[in-house]
Amino acid sequence: MRSRYSAFVKTNITYLLRTRHSSTQLLDNPQLLQQSCQETTWTSLCIHQCHKGQENNDQGTVTFSAHYIESGKSGVLTETSRFVKEGQQWYYLDGCLS
């Protein structure tokens, strides 16, 4: 989760697309991601809960709040993200806004 947050901060669209699970990759539009990253200043990340399930489990969730500034106004994005592990790599699956 922290690496994806950093990718949003640094406008690293390639990394964001590469770390999204292949089953949901088509939901991301690279041009819209680029535009969103350029219009948003991410200011901080707070991880509230990280759950990887049982040992050898290939699924996990992360609940976080990401603070940002957009169009001169501050805001907070709070989400519970689902991840799936394939090999040694975790991939973002989807998220539910809180």
Image: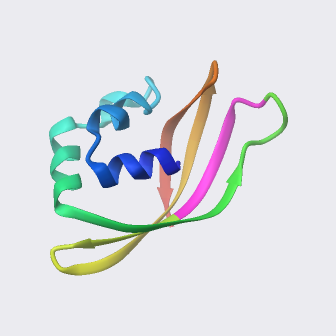
Q: Indicate whether 28 appears above or below 87.
A: below
**Residue depicted at x 59% and y 59%:** 63
The quarter of the picture where residue 74 lies is bottom left
Residue 49 on image: x %, y %: 68, 60
Task: Say left or right for 12 vs 60.
Answer: left
Q: Indicate whether 1 appears above or below 13.
A: below
Instruction: Determine the residue located farthest toward the right in the rendered image.
Output: 55
**Residue depicted at x 63% and y 23%:** 88
Instruction: Determine the residue located farthest toward the bottom in the rendered image.
Output: 73
**Residue depicted at x 22% and y 37%:** 29
Task: Say left or right for 76 vs 12.
Answer: right
Residue 36 on image: x %, y %: 21, 54
**Residue depicted at x 67% and y 35%:** 59
Q: Give yes or no for residue 61 being in the magenta stretch.
A: yes
- The prevailing secondary structure element of the residues shown in magenta is strand
Residue 92 on image: x %, y %: 49, 38
